[in-house]
Image: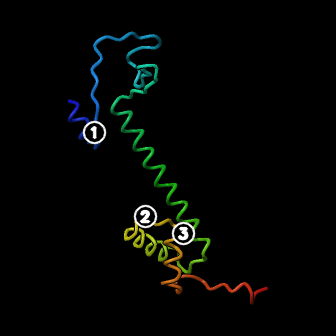
Amino acid sequence: MAEKIAKKLNINEKTVVECKEFEVIEGNLDNSLWIMHINNEFKIVLDVEEYMKLMETMKNVMKENFELKLEKAILSEFPVDYDDVKAVVLEEMKRDENASISEILNKVKLEHPNLFYNLDLEKIF
């Protein structure tokens, strides 16, 4: 059973513990979250489904956070067409996964200046 759950969760290394004797100090065993006291440390134990929901929520939050940062970075550079710039930036990010958004955006701006408005503020003011 543990192998099946680990595979479902995409976990390679796991520790399986079988608790044969334990004492419920507070609450009841039907809760989906347990706080266990082991060797003077507190551990959180979740139902598999609760864990899956938590991971999915975290994944969605991280994706939304990334998209907002990307949007802010692109818009701060005054793109001619936001969607075109976003597509080029995302392609560059696939090639260099370790680069930051600003590094990739600077590279795209240098290689594709036609995607951005050239605002020469010296001439404006």
- Residue drawn at x 54%, y 60% is 68
Pointer 1 or 3: first along the chain: 1
In the rendered view, would you say 22 is above or below 35? above
Task: Identify the residue under disc 1.
Answer: 13
Q: Nearer the viewer, mark 1 or mark 3?
A: 1
> In terms of sequence position, does the residue under pointer 2 or pointer 1 come before the other?
1
> Which quarter of the image is occupied by the C terminus?
bottom right
Q: Secondary structure at mark 3?
A: helix
The Cα–Cα distance between marks 2 and 1, rounded to whole angstroms, is 25 Å
Q: Are marks 2 and 1 in contact (CB under 8 Å)?
A: no
Q: Nearer the viewer, residue 92 or 41?
A: 41
Pointer 2 residue: 98
Measured as percent of width and height from the top left, residue 6 is found at 26, 37
What is the CA distance from the residue labelled 1 to the residue labelled 3? Answer: 35 Å
Note whether 28 is above or below 82 in the view shown.
Answer: above
The image quarter containing residue 20 is top left
